[in-house]
Image (cartoon, rainbow, N blue to C red):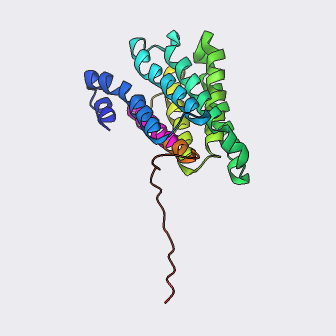
Amino acid sequence: MIHVLAVAAEAETLRRLTQPLLAPLLIAAVLTAAPRMQRTTVLTLGGLVAAWAGDSLGQLVPDPSHLIAPVAFLVALLLYAAALAPQWAHNRDPMRLALAIPYGAVVIGLFVACADGAGSQLPLVAAYAVGLGVTAFIAAGGNPLTWVGGTLFLVSSSVLAMDWFLPGAAIPMSDVWVMATYIAGHGLLVAGIVQLLPSRRWTPAQSGAALVIVES
């Protein structure tokens, strides 16, 4: 929240100081929840380290032509998708499978719109678009937390790609929207992954109503 407010207020120093703190906080959450290292935990931690590289090293060279941030976030997306893939394969809900259509449409539309502005980075943009769509699709097959988190990731990266590669795109307060959806999506995605762990020290709270029947 402090980071998003710093972005909105154009407080550059506070923005630079707070952005690299998100991934370490989520790493701490995963480590305290997981009683032992297992496949899902290792892949999630790897994704968070890659995301931290994008958040911190990407600030040194914010121009996407230097590739640090795009490549780091692409690696993070692929690791998250790999962490969630077994759960998706086990729970292939037809309704969630239907999400491939709108997710695919968003990714294809974004790629077509940004292709001209990508120049020599077109292969990276294509790879990132595919990785983003695959991650959002697989995240939809985990649980409601990963579903919403993956969708917010898709929104955040779509707005960011338009800022980077779509000439003339003018989205009001785009920096604020990018970071707000990125932070919320990241937090929900990791919380959902923690909830999917077969054993854990703590569980993210679930919202929803409960029906209790008391027999007299």
Residue 158 x/y as whole percent: 54, 31
The one of 192 and 169 positioned closer to us in this rendering: 192
Q: Quadrant of the N terminus?
A: top left
The region drawn magenta spans 173-190
Q: Residue at x 43, y 36 (%)?
A: 183
Residue 173 x/y as whole percent: 38, 33
For this orientation, the residue located farthest to the front is 36
Picture layout, residue 203 above or below residue 73:
below
Q: Residue at x 46, y 13 (%)?
A: 63
* 159 relative to 80 in the view: left or right: left
Number of marks present in the image shown = 0
Residue 114 x/y as whole percent: 59, 23
Q: Is residue 167 magenta?
A: no
Picture layout, residue 212 above or below residue 208:
below
Q: Is residue 176 magenta?
A: yes
The one of 100 and 84 positioned closer to us in this rendering: 84
* 150 relative to 52 in the view: left or right: right
Q: Main secondary structure of the magenta part?
A: helix
Residue 26 x/y as whole percent: 43, 35
* 36 relative to 98 in the view: left or right: left
Q: Residue at x 62, y 28 (%)?
A: 78
The one of 74 and 8 positioned closer to us in this rendering: 74
Picture layout, residue 30 above or below residue 216:
above
State whether residue 162 appears in this view: no
